[in-house]
Image (cartoon, grey):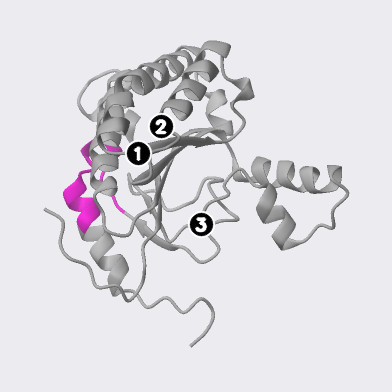
């Protein structure tokens, strides 16, 4: 059950680096693919929780980075098939929870069939307005910022913070809270521009073991923090 929250610091945009699928599987003597499958199930639970949160508007999940292409081809191919299966299965959840689906990152490098699945899901959920779930796919923040600057220059605009911000993949609010699972304490090229004033929380819990109960506790700690944004 979600607790009632004081509103001294609004939580509108939550981002999660979903880390630890492989280690979760290895610790159980399973193939890494089993960890990814379990991790996909957790996404549903966390999305449903967030769709019922009183202030959350956006949930951004780091699903596949520009660096993840370096993994073995068999694992990459499995992740692409899993993503296609996830989107096909979760459309019902998106509709039930009134969740809009979006992506950030350069999806042009994904297969044409997967791109079609992504666009179909976006179209089917475009009018949902309870929560926007964003999957970061083939995403790297340095790549995003570089592409944004080039868009500014291509349009013969002055390179300003405002113009760069408009050209980013993420025309959403800045991130209020970033959570990383598995005990690692780094951003790994994730939302560098949007996290300028984010709060951070690192948990040793592996992503397949992450639950709405733990998320609820982390959000409670977020509300206890005093965010001054450089002021007093």
The local secondary structure at tag 3 comes to loop
The mark that comes first in sequence, 2 or 1, is 1
Asked where in the image residue 18 lies, by quadrant, the reply is: top left
The tag on residue 7 is none
* Residue 114 or residue 207, whichever sits in front: 114
The tag on residue 173 is 3
The local secondary structure at tag 2 comes to helix
Q: Are marks 3 and 2 in contact (CB under 8 Å)?
A: no
Q: Are marks 2 and 1 in contact (CB under 8 Å)?
A: yes
Q: CA distance from mark 3 to mark 2?
A: 20 Å
* Rendered location of residue 85, percent (x, y): 36, 16
* Residue 141 or residue 185, whichever sits in front: 141
Residue lying at the far bottom of the rendered structure:
232
The tag on residue 99 is 1
* Residue 136 or residue 87, whichever sits in front: 87
Q: Which residues are magenta?
A: 203-216
- In the rendered image of this protein, does residue 73 appear above or below residue 167? above
Query: In front: mark 3 or mark 1?
Result: 1
- Residue 215 sits inside the magenta stretch: yes
Asked where in the image residue 2 lies, by quadrant, the reply is: bottom left
Query: In front: mark 3 or mark 2?
Result: 2
The mark that comes first in sequence, 3 or 1, is 1
The tag on residue 125 is 2
Q: CA distance from mark 2 to mark 1?
A: 7 Å
- Residue 38 sits inside the magenta stretch: no
* Rendered location of residue 52, percent (x, y): 24, 49
């Amino acid at each position: 059950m979600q607790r009632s929250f004081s509103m001294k610091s609004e939580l509108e945009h939550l981002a999660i680096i979903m880390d630890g699928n492989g280690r979760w599987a290895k610790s159980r003597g399973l193939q890494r693919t089993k960890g990814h499958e379990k991790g996909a199930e957790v996404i549903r639970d966390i999305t449903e929780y967030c769709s019922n949160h009183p202030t959350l508007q956006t949930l951004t999940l780091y699903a596949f980075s520009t660096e993840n292409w370096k993994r073995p081809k068999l694992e990459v191919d499995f992740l692409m098939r899993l993503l296609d299966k996830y989107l096909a299965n979760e459309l019902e959840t998106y509709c039930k929870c009134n969740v809009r689906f979006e992506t950030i990152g350069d999806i042009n490098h994904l297969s044409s069939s997967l791109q079609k699945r992504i666009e179909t899901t976006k179209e089917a959920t475009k009018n949902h307005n309870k929560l926007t779930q964003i999957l970061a796919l083939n995403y790297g923040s340095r790549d995003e910022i570089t592409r944004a600057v080039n868009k500014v220059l291509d349009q013969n605009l002055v390179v300003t913070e405002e113009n760069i911000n408009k050209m980013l993949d993420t025309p959403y609010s800045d991130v209020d809270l970033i959570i990383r699972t598995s005990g690692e304490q780094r951003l790994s090229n994730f939302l560098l521009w949007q996290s300028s004033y984010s709060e951070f929380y690192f948990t040793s819990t592996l992503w397949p073991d992450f639950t709405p109960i733990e998320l609820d506790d982390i959000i409670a700690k977020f509300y206890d923090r005093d965010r001054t944004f450089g002021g007093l």
